[in-house]
Amino acid sequence: MLDAGINYIDTSIDGLSEERIGRYISHRRDEYYLASKCGCLVGATPAPRGQRSQHVFTLENIVAGVEQSLARMKTDYLDVVQFHSSPSRQTLEKHGALEALLELREAGKVRFAGMSGTLPHLIGHIEMGVFDAFQIPYSAVEREHEATIAAAAQKGAGIVIRGGAAKGAPTEGKQAGLQWERWRRAQLDDLLEGMTPMEFILRFTITNPDLDTTIVGTINPDLQTNLDILEKGPLPADRRTSMKRRSNVSLLQARRREWTGNDRRFLVVG
């Protein structure tokens, strides 16, 4: 990635990625910005693949998590630390979690305080006025955060996008899972006009003028192909106009089915 020119690396306490970053590229620390998360329970057994790890938003766990990240990645500072799992304002303030992160920023161990946020709590996070950056899911098939992305940018916060490649779901050979179902329901094929679905999705993502960084999170990606696509820049003007005119009714109906399926209410953030 570094040799390809990528200079922003986002990771988390969960899993082995922090240890691998420390082992393999810590000697090139001045070549990249490094972001991680906090709130994940330090010392907990990793959750099985596809399940969310336990999160504890206390002063002690936030400090322990950041100190662990610094040690694992063999660095004396993190550029961005983001609260994981979009906790509410009440949760952040109840046991000193927010206070802990802001004090770590004052101490120079963290340069910028961030939030990996989603609705419904994201609106409150923006209104708090304490976060330097927000990581928010967004793509052509996941547009429910468009207004909050704009609101955060207007407040002067940096915007980092995750899911900007829709997990590669429309790619030939995948075409499964929630993101694929959203692509299928959105019926965007008529806008491709020679583009592959992945090219359309990536270029749609970077068309948004409020974005600072796009995280392309596909499994085993053909990295160079994605980079070549991004070099082409935003969608052509006619495609942008078509997307603006196109109603989001079908997408909203799909969300409603996801949120209320099986007589349960839950928020889909994947």
Image (cartoon, rainbow, N blue to C red):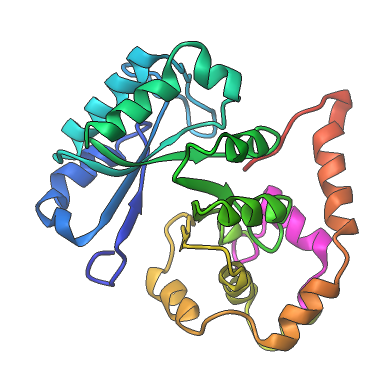
Determine whether, in the image, residue 208 is placed left or right of residue 225: right
Image height of 222 relative to 58, above or below: below
Q: Residue at x 88, y 57 (%)?
A: 250
Q: Percent x, y for residue 235?
A: 63, 81
Residue range (magenta): 170-189
Q: Residue at x 47, y 20 (%)?
A: 55
Q: Position of residue 48 (x, y in %)?
A: 47, 27
Magenta span contains residue 173: yes
Is residue 40 in view?
no
Residue at figure coordinates x 43%, y 20% from the top left = 97
The answer to whether residue 222 is left or right of residue 26 is: right
Picture coordinates of residue 233 (x, y %)? 52, 81
**Where is residue 169, by image quadrant?**
bottom right
129 within the magenta span: no
Q: Is residue 39 above or below residue 111?
A: above
Q: Is residue 255 visible?
A: yes
* Front in this rendered view, residue 168 or 87: 87
Residue located 59% across and 41% down the image: 126
As displayed, is residue 174 above or below residue 196? Answer: above
Query: How far across and how far down the image is residue 84, in percent?
Result: 48, 32
Instruction: Determine the image quadrant of residue 98.
Output: top left
Image quadrant in which you'd find residue 96: top left
Q: How many marks?
A: 0
